[in-house]
Amino acid sequence: MKIKRQIKSAVLVALVFLLAAGIMAQESRPKEITLSLEEAIFRALKHNLNLIAEVYSTEKASESISLAKEVFYPGLEVSYGSSRTVQPSTWWLYGSGTYITSTQNYETRISQRLPIGGSLSLIMSNYTTDTNQLFQLFNPYYNTQLRFSFVQPLLRNFGPRVARREIIVASQNYAISEAQLKSQVMETIYQVEEAYWNLVLARENLKVRQQSLQLAREQLAKTRKEIEVGQQAAIEILNVQAAVSQREAEIVQAEAAVRSAEDRLKVILNLASGVDLASITLIPTEKPEFKPVEIDLKEAIQIALTSRPDLQMENLNIESKQFNYDFARNQTLPQLDLNFSYWSPGISGDRLIYRDNNPWTGEVVGKIPGSMWDSFRDASRFLYNNWSVSFTLSLPLADMLGRSRVALASVELREAQAKQKAREQQVMLEVSEAVHNLNTLAKSVEAFRVAREYAEKRLEAETRKLAVGLTTNFFVLDAQEKLANARSNELKALVDYNLAQARLEKVLGTIMLNRKISLSQVGRSDSD
């Protein structure tokens, strides 16, 4: 029984070990991900780290607009003060001894900045005094005032554009940031296409080299049999063995190219990093196709001039410099402000009644009660209307500095305009090169297709000739090598043509429009 239990335990341990080993082997097995080009682009839009960072930058610029708008929100201020004064009498009217005065101040202010550069304030204040001094008409005494104040610049800082300067600058920065995001999206889409098609090229080239190696190995096996039966000389095997070794070396290089292209695409898609790169294998599902397109160069240039985000940024930069120039000119004007105030006072308190209605007697014989709320009520009823209008003119002493700012803003504006012209010329050159390159590659695709067909026919001919003894292994192997190169060249021409189409869309600024991609799709995963 003891031996049976030991056997059972050993079997159980072995099963657990095998199960664990199987799980570890499964976990260490590379994970395969099949990807179409559209799926690769979609994943990059959601997970590419450069795009995510650019999205955050755009969001910051958007929040800056909200922050700039807050200057036009109404402001509320509430203040309170209290004091108590105790001192000996210094005037015979106050009487002898010590007099005590207590005061309290209340103020509530609502201020509003106006879109034309001025400001409006509504102030409700109260001043309360309680004293033991003689000859007071009210004690305690409540003085309330309701005041409207309006200040409007008429020259410097006048107008909605100057008043909304922070908002305009923030909006321009946001538009520039959005154009930068669009440019980054376009660049990322092109990078994905480039990496995707290069991976396709590397994998297909590996297949071509594997086929070429297989042909060489078959030729080696056939040559060995023919040597055994005396149909060929033993020296013939050397050429075939050399070809097999050469093609095995080409396989190693082709496999390295696949790994390199695969890693580049993984990084762009943010699939893995570091040592985790080897744990994922990407399987592209698409093959390059030849779809001829007709491009009118003049029309293409016009599309690029209106669609390129970098040109949009240059235009926005010019608008920003123009605004800075206008603002600098405004700041050289004299400061002329209109000040208008309208206020209504309210006075109340305990009215003192002196003997014989003569305050000089100093003898209080009664009181007519009054309260703080009575003073608030009188102020709000506008029983006493008061107003004032004034103009304040101040001339800038630093006029020379102001002129320097205008000159600097003018230079920056002209600099931005020159950069815009240079960018337009660069765009036209890029479009012209992209169109010509696309047309050239279209011809190359056709030429390499014909070359591949001739290489196939030549290999067929050399194989038939070898079968009847009219040629040697050297010419057959040479035909095989040329066919492999022709297939690789045709495939590369197809990939280059597809990339040329993507690059043309990029330089035209239509790469997002053609794929129906909007900025709202960028940097947001499904779980967000």
Image: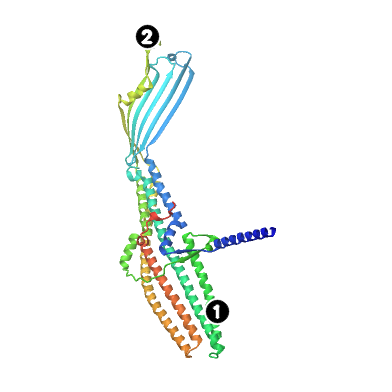
Q: Position of residue 407 (x, y in %)?
A: 38, 51
Local crowd at mark 2 within 10 Å, few (<14), some, or many (≥20)?
A: some
The local secondary structure at tag 2 comes to helix
Residue 400 visible? The answer is: no
Please name the residue that numbered disc 2 is placed on. Answer: 355
Q: Position of residue 106 (x, y in %)?
A: 41, 27
Give the residue drawn at x 52%, y 73%: 253
Return the residue nearer the eye: 142 or 227. Answer: 227
Quadrant placement of the N terminus: bottom right
Depicted 353 relative to depicted 265: above or below: above
Depicted 238 relative to depicted 103: above or below: below
Residue type of the residue flagged with mark 1: Ser
Q: CA distance from mark 2 to mark 1?
A: 132 Å
Give the residue drawn at x 46%, y 68%: 199
Please name the residue that numbered disc 1 is placed on. Answer: 245
Residue 483 visible? The answer is: yes
The local secondary structure at tag 1 comes to helix
